Amino acid sequence: MFDPAHGSYGDTILRLNDRTLTLADYFTPANQQHLDDYDMDLGSGGVMLLPPGAASATVPNLLVHTGKYGTLVIANRSNLGKYSNIDNVQQELPQIMGAIRGAPAYFNGTIYYGPGFSRILSIPIKNGHVPVTGPTGETSTIFEYTGATPSVSSNGTSNGILWAIQYNPTTRNPSATLYAYDATNLGVSLYNSSLNSGRDVAPAAIKFTTPTVVNGKVYVGTESDVSVFGLGKWPNAPAISCSRASSEGTILVSLSDSTPSSWITFTTDGSVPTQDSTRYTAPLTFSASLTIRARAFAPGFGPSPISESNYLLDSVVGNGTGLIGRYFDYSEDAAVAPTSQRIDRNIDFIWSGNSPIPGVRGSSWEGVWTGYLQAETTGMHTFYASPSAGVSLWIDHRKLIDKDDFQLIPAGQARLFLRAGIKVPIELHYSESGVGTGLKLSWSAPGLPREAIPTSQLYPAG
């Protein structure tokens, strides 16, 4: 709440005294109560101090800020303007963009913002003033949900590159995707990491991440790793070929690479091949389902893209029809009866805030799916829930994913050994208290790529 008399400064930009951190000055927008009432808080954005080149001779110390309301505020750092019926700031452009949930970037007279469910926008500033009434440039890519927190690399005032990370919890590819644009013309896309997914793919994205550029490399924080991007040379991806072995029920797998002086390593447990992994020397014989991943290395080169092939031997493809899905409004007593019920072929939904089923609202509801799961192959299975928030999963009476267990690393993943053809109970709970975007339950196993659990392997409970 905003109450200066009692030291409460909600929806407020604060300037604190050095060392003592006591209040020196502040700015609170005139519509603060409206922002508070409708969850349009100013604090969702980050304050950026503008360099002298963007300021004016009369007002050299400026800052720029935007929050969920999308109003651009340029304020004098030496006199922020406090609180009044009319905002006492250097300039204010009301609602010129969507909701901001991160900080802007600046380069050579231009401010860059990445609103949620929008393109990254460029806004020019000169002599402490934005001479236009809205953005003048935008990317072709829409950045989902929380938007993007961009950063800029350059050689002084030339060769500016704007970097941004795509986070989309409902995408079919949950990886963090790094984008690069010409900072002087956002319509020119220079690179994105999905162009060569075998080499440049990053792990699962997390919200509010900023690409960090240091010494010619771009660092991207993800759910489980830090991915590093940079210029370099790489061998070609290994080729994987398969033929029937002489003995029944076995296969021969051969690996090759066209890069001179290269060697190949491989794994069969789903891990990433490194130089220390098993080195390939001759065709490999396998008699069980497996996923083989291979990578080439060569002197003076970085690691090649990863090649992957899945081989299912004696797989059991079921004839399931899906799981029983029960949907409850929070206003209903789930112990008595569901609001709506049906058989869902699999758990692979995109709701985008809409009702998941007729009779249930698009927010504040719960889903429970029950039935039996049948493995196609024998081995360690990995299960993935996306998004992981609000999800609990039981398989064979074991709780694998717990929506209340925030220590689970990585979140929304669990492993369990299953035998081909054996049906085990499965129960999935999902709670939606906001505006649900979607839900996907996937698996991977020896010989099986990561995919939504198919209908053929799901059976409704009696």
Image: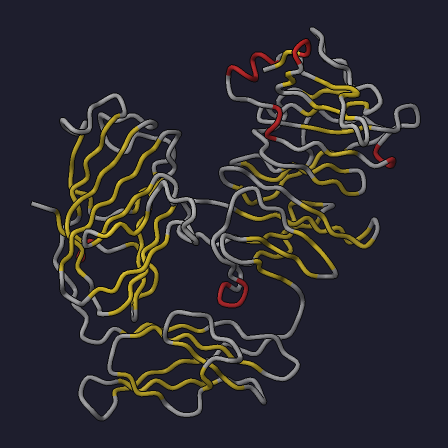
Residue 58 drawn above or below residue 227: above
**Which colour assignment does the render follow?**
secondary structure
For the image shown, how many numbered marks are present on the structure? 0
Toward the left, the furthest residue is 462
- From the top left corner, tell me how far across and down residue 413 is, in percent: 36, 54
**Quadrant of the image occupied by residue 367:** top left
- Considering the image in quadrants, where does the N terminus appear? top right
**Quadrant of the image occupied by residue 140:** top right
Toward the right, the furthest residue is 57
- From the top left corner, tell me how far across and down residue 240 is, in percent: 40, 80
Q: Could you tell me which residue is drawn at 62 percent across and 62 percent down? A: 229
Q: Could you tell me which residue is drawn at 72 percent across and 24 percent down? A: 14
Q: Could you tell me which residue is drawn at 32 percent across and 62 percent down? A: 444
Toward the front, the furthest residue is 20
Residue 351 drawn above or below residue 72: below
Lateral position of residue 320 relative to residue 223, left or right: left
- From the top left corner, tell me how far across and down residue 272 is, in percent: 46, 70
Please tell me which residue lies in front, 24 or 166: 24
Lateral position of residue 104 relative to residue 430, left or right: right
- Considering the image in quadrants, where does the C terminus appear? top left
Q: Could you tell me which residue is drawn at 15 percent across and 56 percent down? A: 424
Please tell me which residue lies in front, 60 or 231: 60
- From the top left corner, tell me how far across and down residue 3 is, in percent: 64, 11
Please tell me which residue lies in front, 286 or 130: 286
Q: Is residue 131 visible?
A: no
